[in-house]
Amino acid sequence: MREIKESDWKLLRQLHDVALERFCERVLGEVQRRSAASKKSYHERYLDICRLLKRRDRELVDAFNGPRRSTAVQQLTVIYSQGLLSEEEFARFSPETRSAVDSFLAIVRD
């Protein structure tokens, strides 16, 4: 599947901000938990948070940067695989797009 249908593209653009907010909420929760890890020194917590943010920044780029129809299925796959869309939201995509995402996920899992 080279490009997704126009209706799926519009839906992805709608859900993009929702998924981005969920991603950021998740990361900020992780930062908060690591910051509160009182058994570690402030420096250890700081370094732990820096490592976390570096990893999450790469994930953010893969899922959200430069949305284009030509890469929409790949980005949707990343967003969906990270649990940033509900099953109901994912079900709103066409069967062709859901099948393409499932195919990408199968490749990644193998």
Image (cartoon, grey):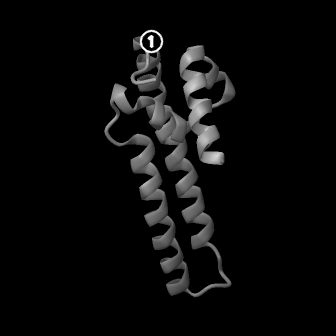
Give the residue number, with chain letter if any, for mark 1.
Answer: 7
Q: In the image, residue 84 lies at what x, y percent?
A: 58, 39
Residue under the point 65% across and 76% down: 37
Residue under the point 66% across and 48% down: 110
Residue under the point 60% across and 42% down: 107
Q: Is residue 99 above or below residue 105?
A: above
Q: Is residue 8 above or below residue 74?
A: above
Considering the numbered disc 1 on the image, is that residue within a helix, a strand or a loop?
helix
- Relative placement, left or right, of 3 versus 15 is left
* Total numbered badges shown on the rendered structure: 1
Q: Is residue 8 above or below residue 27?
A: above
| Disc 1: CA contacts within 10 A as few (<14), some (14-19) or many (>=20) | few
Q: In the image, residue 54 lies at what x, y percent?
A: 43, 65
Amino acid identity at mark 1 = Ser
Front residue (pair 72, 20)? 72
- Relative placement, left or right, of 70 versus 84 is left
Residue under the point 60% across and 70% down: 34
- Relative placement, left or right, of 52 versus 4 is right
Q: In the image, residue 73 lies at what x, y percent?
A: 47, 30
Q: Is residue 48 above or below residue 81?
A: below
